[in-house]
Amino acid sequence: MATSPGDPHQTSQDTRRRVLQMAAPLRADRVDGSVDHFLAMLQDRLPLWIRILNDLSHLAGKGRVRDNLVPVARAGIDYYVDVQSAALPAFTSPSVTVRFRQALRENGLGPPTETAPLAHYLDAERRLGRVAAQVDPEASARLLLAGCFHHAYIEMFVGADAGPTRDVGAEEIVRELRLEPFPG
């Protein structure tokens, strides 16, 4: 389900409601509380993360694109570290994983929930000439999120000292997207 920028409070409440709706079928495998912990973390963190992504729409044409995206990438790293560290113990059961996928689909919380607002922002900046014309907003949104996820994954498994800090990582992710047009 693609989301478009709207009232941030309503978006957060809607996201929280959808997480709660998908929680019921996932709780059937309550073995050690890990699913409950994951759902609580998701309910707490996902609405803020989606609001951060949707708030980008208000920045189109303001400031530098890179400066607008670095705090988003940093927030993405933080989000993925928190949520994925809770997800790992929750998804040891294949039946939980299958029910989670189904619940995501039924509640419109799949990957487009994250990529759509970021792609909308990048497309707006591209139309304004502040992002290179050849940039694919959807693919660039996925790459930014993948970079954040990768940074979080490495930090969780290898340790925070195994790579750049979260701040430096966020800057590198945005810089290497090479979104801005070349002067010339």
Image: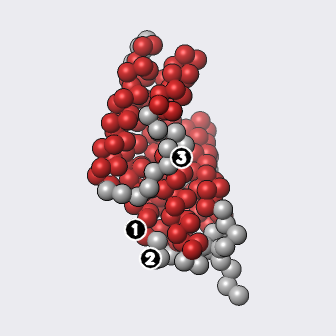
Q: Are marks 2 and 3 in contact (CB under 8 Å)?
A: no
Q: Tell me if residue 25 comes above or below residue 145 in the rendering.
A: above
Drawn side of residue 82 relative to residue 135, left or right: left
- Residue 45, given in percent of the width and then of the height, sits at 38, 42
Determine the CA span between mark 2 and mark 3: 25 Å
Q: Toward which corner of the image does residue 36 lie, by quadrant?
A: top left
Q: Toward which corner of the image does residue 15 lie, by quadrant?
A: top left
What amino acid type should be assigned to the residue bearing mark 1? His
Q: Is residue 85 visible?
A: no
Q: Tell me if residue 32 comes above or below residue 137 in the rendering.
A: above
Task: Name the one closer to the observer, 157 or 42.
Answer: 42
Q: Are marks 3 and 1 in contact (CB under 8 Å)?
A: no
Q: Residues within 10 Å of mark 1 (few under 14, many from 20)?
A: few
Q: Tell me if residue 40 comes above or below residue 53 in the rendering.
A: above
In primary-sequence order, the first of circles 3 and 1 is: 1
* Residue under numbered circle 2: 62
Q: Are marks 1 and 2 in contact (CB under 8 Å)?
A: yes
* Residue under numbered circle 1: 58
- Residue 77, given in percent of the width and then of the height, sits at 51, 49
What amino acid type should be assigned to the residue bearing mark 3? Pro
Q: Which part of the image, by quadrant, shows the C terminus? A: bottom right
Residue at left 45%, top 45%? 79
Task: Name the one closer to the observer, 44 or 172.
Answer: 44
- Secondary structure beneath disc 1? helix
* Residue under numbered circle 3: 112
Determine the CA span between mark 1 and mark 2: 8 Å
What amino acid type should be assigned to the residue bearing mark 2? Lys
- Residue 33, given in percent of the width and then of the height, sits at 39, 18
Residue at left 59%, top 36%? 157
